[in-house]
Amino acid sequence: MITIPLFISGAEIGFIIFILIMVFGADKIPDIARGLGKGMRTLKNASNDIKSEITKSADKQGINKDVSNDVKNEISKVKEDLDEITGSIKRRF
């Protein structure tokens, strides 16, 4: 797994959160977070739909299962990358 080092401290994160509250207001932040969550869920559902369509097409065409497994592996790598980007903040020590 690749981690991206962040060069900000806890105090700087707190200051950024304070600025966000000042700009958007405390009542708008949950709506923004909810919208981001829905967007990520939609993206995940779309990737699952693409995966199932590829699998169905491969089965209909009689393509070797190894190719289908390769596609599944690539899709799982993309999902892992997406989870890494949208997951918790990680620091390299």
Image (cartoon, rainbow, N blue to C red):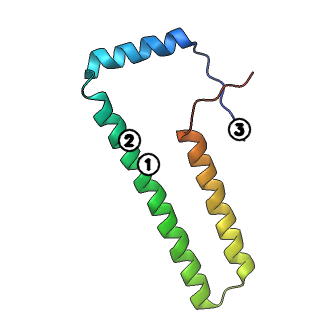
Q: Earlier in the sequence, mark 2 or mark 3?
A: 3
- Determine the CA span between mark 3 and mark 1: 20 Å
Instruction: State the SS at label 3.
Output: loop
Q: Is residue 1 left or right of residue 18?
A: right
Q: In the image, what residue occupies the spot 58% across and 30% down?
A: 89
The answer to whether 62 is drawn above or below residue 52 in the figure is: below
Residue for badge 2? 36
- Determine the CA span between mark 1 and mark 2: 6 Å
The x and y percentages for residue 31 are 28, 36
Q: Residues within 10 Å of mark 3 (few under 14, many from 20)?
A: few
Q: Are marks 1 and 2 in contact (CB under 8 Å)?
A: yes
> Residue type at mark 2?
Leu
Instruction: State the SS at label 2.
Output: helix
Q: Is residue 93 left or right of residue 60?
A: right
Question: Could you say which quadrant of the image residue 16 lies in?
Answer: top left
The answer to whether 36 is drawn above or below residue 58 in the figure is: above
Q: Nearer the viewer, mark 2 or mark 3?
A: 2
